[in-house]
Amino acid sequence: MSKRAPLLILAGALALTMTACGQTSSEPSTGAVTGGAAADKKIVMGFSQVGAESGWRTANTKSVQEAAEKAGIQLKFSDAQQKQQNQIKALRSFVQQRVDVIAFSPVVESGWDTVLKEAKNANIPVILTDRAVDSADTSLYKTFLGSDFVEEGKKAGQWLVEEYKDSKDPVTIVELQGTTGSAPANDRKAGFAEVIGADSKFKIAASQTGDFTRAKGKEVMDAFLKSTPKIDVLFAHNDDMGLGAIEAIEGAGKVPGKDIKIITIDAVKDGMQALADGKINYIVECSPLLGPQLMDLAGKVVKGEQVPARVVTEETTFTQEQAKEALPSRQY
């Protein structure tokens, strides 16, 4: 062995040590990303929205998009246009793209098990936001973030019972339901019926879907006014249908808020203005600003942290005077 050999061996060993410990090489490591690098990895969320059927939904979409940007989460957004088949297609696309987390507001409650099992098999956590599903297998999603729709219906019914507590005359009600089969439509109807059912003077003469849209609300209310000669109260499952119904009521020569009392749910700015103007009598709030809570939950489930199975948003109710006070600072 030459005298230079030990020096060459020592230099080689030092070079290997520096490369392994200090990663001084400009080439990327082929090993697994750990520690700080994993923490710096941008979360990719696939989000499927119901559609843009109302002012509430538009505000909800904006909240999700702005919160994702603020949280540094890459958002892959899909609009289902109120069709379940579009939403299922979007969820499958998210699975194929290997996103880190999927969040969606289900168009309807039923028919999700197959696609949710596909996400589970791909180890992609799912968060339900705004609306629930009726699957018996709750392991198919990590958590549900949203309002208590049954409680919203109860609050609407409680106001009505209080409003007519001193009257013994029959009270004829018409109901504009949300999208058929959707969680808010099913639950708001159930909560409302439970409360008013305790007093026989309250009678729902007609109940039909208005698809949560202003145009459909007007169309169905037109039909109610023709088929039901005397209507005392309208219960609309959201503000937009109520606003459409106001157009129909005024078109029929009646005064909304007086000739026909109106209760709605949501508390979007247009609805609150109608309440302040006396055209709506009472609004139960359903906040669309779920974005920040959703991004917080997404970060936790991606890290494998435990989250509550149900996260309920805090909401209130509004009378005319309360609407006037709230309007100047209303965000949506």
Image: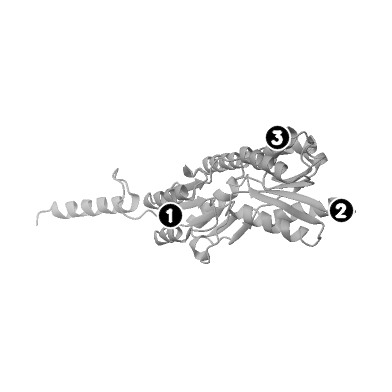
Left or right: 319 with respect to 30?
right
Pointer 2 or 3: first along the chain: 2
The local secondary structure at tag 3 comes to helix
Distance from the alpha carbon under mark 2 to that under mark 3: 27 Å
Q: Is residue 51 left or right of residue 192?
A: left
- Residue 28 point in image, percent of width and height: 31, 46
User: Which of pointers 2 and 1 lies earlier in the amino acid sequence?
Assistant: 1
Residue placed at 52% from the left, 63% from the top?
135
**Amino acid type of the residue tagged 2 in the rendering:** Asp
| Count of marks placed on residues | 3
**Any part of residue 166 in sight:** yes
Question: In the rendered image, which quarter is residue 128 located in?
Answer: bottom right
**Amino acid carrying mark 3 in the image:** Glu
The residue indicated by pointer 2 is 169
Local secondary structure at mark 2: loop
Q: Amino acid at mark 1?
A: Gly
Report which residue position mark 1 lands on: 35
Q: Nearer the viewer, mark 1 or mark 3?
A: 3
Residue 290, x across and y down, in percent: 61, 47
Q: Residues within 10 Å of mark 1 (few under 14, many from 20)?
A: few
Residue 177 visible from this viewpoint? no
